[in-house]
Image (cartoon, grey):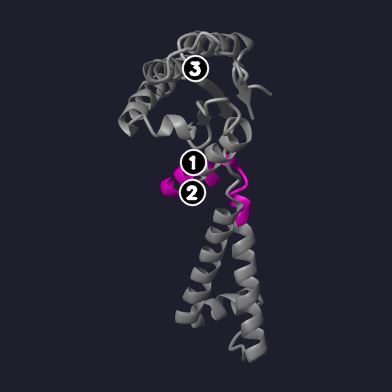
Amino acid sequence: MPVMSEEGHARVMQAVAAAEAHTSGEIVTVLADRSDGYTDIALVWCAFAAFSVLTLLALMPTPALRLVAWFNGAWNVEWWPGEIFGLAAAVGILVFLFVLLLQLPDALRFALVPGRVKSLRVEDRAIELFKVGADRRTHGRTGVLIYLSLKEHRAEIVADEAIAGKVEPEEWGAAMADMLGEIRQGRLADGLIAGVQDVGAILAQHFPRADDDQNELPDRLIEL
């Protein structure tokens, strides 16, 4: 189901067309629900919880064994080594599965992903999409991707080689700040439009529109 309304899509597309009217650069906008499923991070938390519980059992085995014996209605139980190791394995597996089930809802799973990992995954996804949809697909290598990943609350601006060599990172930072300022207020379409307008102004300064310029990349917002 699309995140943005048809009206929002139309507004973003109009903003891209307006921005490209003054530059030979090409702007591609992508809106994604998420950049990764973070299954590996979820499994790391499961393993950490299981090993933590096993370590605790190794440090304090007697209370755990007494608890199991009490549940079985037995007194002064004599434990065989195989039974102890089997009990520890069962506890580790149960803890692993329990923590895995806890992370099935997106809210908790994404909350447990470190911020640095989210940033790196969003950056990698943006670069991947740029290579597929914009890299080397314009005559002057003047494509720019504006990428927004909702679950991670992060955005990226990726530029083609010709643009990256001329535009300072601070210029992209200002465009990013304007875009995220609107998005934090819940105005998703306005945020993307602000980013498009700022990127368009940067491109117009460094890459003004030529008389024979053609639209080489789609203006529409791509939702993933």
Majority secondary structure of magenta residues: helix
Q: Amino acid at mark 3?
A: Ser
The x, y position of residue 164, in whole percent, is: 42, 33
Q: Quadrant of the N terminus?
A: top right
Disc number at residue 19? none
Q: Amino acid at mark 2?
A: Val
Looking at the image, which is closer to me, 178 or 170? 170
Q: Name above or below for residue 220 compared with residue 147.
A: above
Q: Mark 1 and mark 2 in contact (Cβ < 8 Å)?
A: no
Magenta range: 100-120
The x, y position of residue 130, in whole percent, is: 56, 34
Q: Name above or below for residue 63 compared with residue 145.
A: below
Disc number lying in front (3 or 2):
3
| Residue 51 among those drawn in magenta | no
Q: Name above or below for residue 77 compared with residue 39.
A: below
* Real-space CA distance between mark 3 and mark 2, rounded to the nearest whole angstrom: 39 Å
Disc number at residue 24? 3
Disc number lying in front (3 or 1):
3
Looking at the image, which is closer to me, 13 or 63? 13
Disc number at residue 113? 2
State the residue position of label 1. Answer: 123
**Label 2: element kind:** loop
Q: Is residue 84 left or right of residue 153?
A: right
Q: Residue shown at 59%/13% (left/top)? A: 214
Which mark sits nearer the N-terminus, 3 or 1?
A: 3
Residue at far left of view: 170
